[in-house]
Amino acid sequence: MTWIWNNSPALPVVLLLPTAIAIPLFALIERRLARWLALAVSLTTVGLSILNLVKALSLGPIHYHMGGWPPPIGIEYVLDPLSAFVLLVINTIGFLVLVHAKKVVDREIPESGKHVPYYAVAVLMLCGFNGIVVTGDFFNLYVWLEIASLSLYGLIAVGSRKAPVAAIRYLILGTIGACFYLLGLGFLFTMTGTLNMADLKAILPAVGHEPAVVIGLGLIVAGMGLKMALFPLHGWLPDSYTYAPSSSSALIAPIGTKVGAYVLIRVLFFIFGTAYVSRTIPVTTVIGWLAAAGILYGSIMAMAQTELKRMLAYSSIAQVGYIGLGIGLANPLGLIGAVLHLMNHAAMKALLFLVAGNFRTILGHSDIARLDGSTRRRMPWTTAAFAVGALSMIGIPPLAGFFSKWYLALGAVAKKQWIFLAVILLSSLLNAVYFFRVIERIYFARAESTPQLPGMTAGACSGLTLSPLSPIPSKGAEYKSVASRPRLERRGLALANGSSAAEPRTEASASMLVPVLVLAAALIGLGVLNAFIVKGVIGKIVTSAMF
Amino acid sequence: MTKFLLGHYGYWFVFLLMTLGFYGMVVKKNLVKKLIGMNIFQAAIIMFYLSSAGKWKATIPIVDPAIGTAGTARYIDPLQHCLMLTAIVVGVATSGVAYALLITIYKRFGTLHEDELVERMKNDLDME
């Protein structure tokens, strides 16, 4: 037991990496082992993360020296309240999504030969994210980042026919992001001669005025902005989330972009310090304004979508903007809001993407126009969970989503940033518009109005452009006549017939329902307990930041 | 100013290479050319690190009996080279994944040219 206690910072990574490699081997013996192994290791990391959080909160920051080499030379793993907290969020969401994955993977990945590698790559991705969060070394962070990113490309590419195109687009942009990070790190390294975060932080004040440091910081922020899909750098996101299998979207959307946000928070507020990034070099101001633009852009684009997953993808751009806004405020309340929203949005987006997965598995589609009262009767629990998630996204008080917006608003008031405050309020309204559109269909539309032409959404994929900097496909192409598309029509008609028969209650199976309900309950719980979380955990994060 | 420009001449070549790679990634329409641009970009960053490790009148970081361990200033810093070994491995892995994706795309859509690809995907039946 003491062995586990002493080595707990490194254990998640040390367990996940070999498991990712072992899964295909064990699957040779028994294919079902792949999923069980992934679940077992994921559950173990959740347990370890809880242990780590307790340790970090009660004992203060823990510095774990890999292989016993002391920091400036060796790689150290650091567990402070921030990394322990983000670690717990990542691993919990990862576990719930993996529980949910079975049916979705069976249905959305037609080639059964890809199921075993899918779990292996998912575990590898979790490993990468764990490494990013727990490491105290900048170059180590880069390596973990690439491990996670390469797994992400794979997880996206196994989706629908167009998924590889979305994946290669993400790969090109993601590599640009990682290269920017590496280049920025190169500048910092040449100026300070160290890669260790704590060491770098100690040396920085002496060289902070050098242009090379400023360029390095700018490049790192740009690279991480790309990874977290901060507004003008979000081009890869909508297509990737739409075409990936639903369980991939549910893994990437809540966790993937949050890790980018974590690195930004770490670099800006824990290494460079607020005074430097908000006054000497006003990076946070730029991030704040970009985030505000992204919130409005994402919300408006989300309103125009006809397909649930695509709507959620655009909503993700907006929600990541909230975290960016919290970073941009660069005051304690803003940081509380950003970190709280990091957790809340992870839970909300995971829930909503899992619901979209349930819709696709049970109904065969996730088109908003074809959801109606019959959907509710067929899947009462799933739709109820969706309603909870949607209300939380809008920010209805007892639910978790409200409180992060509340702290962000308080932060904006404290900084007298009235435009940011207006953006938060306006975007809540826009959220209400696009989520109530779905809730209205599920709860108030009569089932008789169902037979919308199945082609309504055929073009959701329409104008996928490849050029990394090209704008998002226009909406005009989305409504297309489908009469000339026999295969689609047949499929659509079959579905329409299926739903017009007296709907039996065909709720999703337990493995798909339990994670959804757990997340819905978590949203209520996190909302009710938010004062406890903010005081007990996030308060400690904020006091350890450099304000 | 002239001194600054001349003193950093190695870096200007690196940045030229970087711009070239970036241009390829963003402007070129063929996906393979985009990946070639990506590789040039990565190579430029590797060169950047390596040139920052360079030192005048210093030797490779293997103990030389004539210098001994006391004169560490006479050895170049080996850390950048080690880091870039890792970066090269990462680059190779990225290229591997990328070309695997390209093969899949070519099998499904029969083209790697971006405009044609967009055109063919519009006519594709799959809606998810």
Image: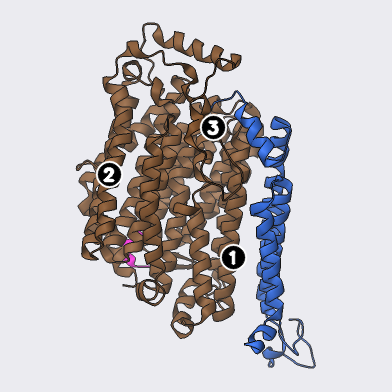
CA gap between label 2 and label 3 equals 27 Å
Q: Nearer the viewer, residue A424 or A9?
A: A424
In the picture, measured across the screen, residue B14 lies left or right of residue A457, that is: right
| Total marks placed | 3
The color scheme shown is by chain
Quadrant where the N terminus of chain A sits is bottom left
Q: Amino acid at mark 2?
A: Ser
Looking at the image, residue B7 lies above or below residue A433: below
Percent across and percent down for residue A275 are 35, 75
- Tell me the tag on residue A292: none
- Label 3–label 1 contact, CB within 8 A: no
| Number of residues whose C-alpha sits closer than 10 Å to that of mark 2, classed few (under 14), some (14–19) or many (20 or more) | many
Q: Chain of mark 2?
A: A
- Chain in brown colour: A
Going from N to C along the chain, the mark reached first, 2 or 3, is 2
Marked residue nearer the N-terminal end (3 or 1)? 1
In the rendered view of the protein, which quadrant contains the C terminus of chain A? bottom left
Residue A65 appears in the rendering: no
Colour used to depict chain B in the structure image? blue
At a point 52% along the width and 20% down the height, the residue shown is A481
Is A490 a magenta residue?
Answer: no
Measured Cα–Cα span from mark 3 to mark 1: 33 Å
**What range of the chain is rendered magenta?**
A54-61
Q: Residue at x 48, y 77 (%)?
A: A199
Main structural element of the magenta stretch: helix, strand or loop?
Answer: helix
Which residue in the protein does label 3 denote? A461
Q: Secondary structure at mark 1?
A: helix
Of the residues shown, which amino acid type is indicated by label 3?
Cys
Element carrying mark 3: helix
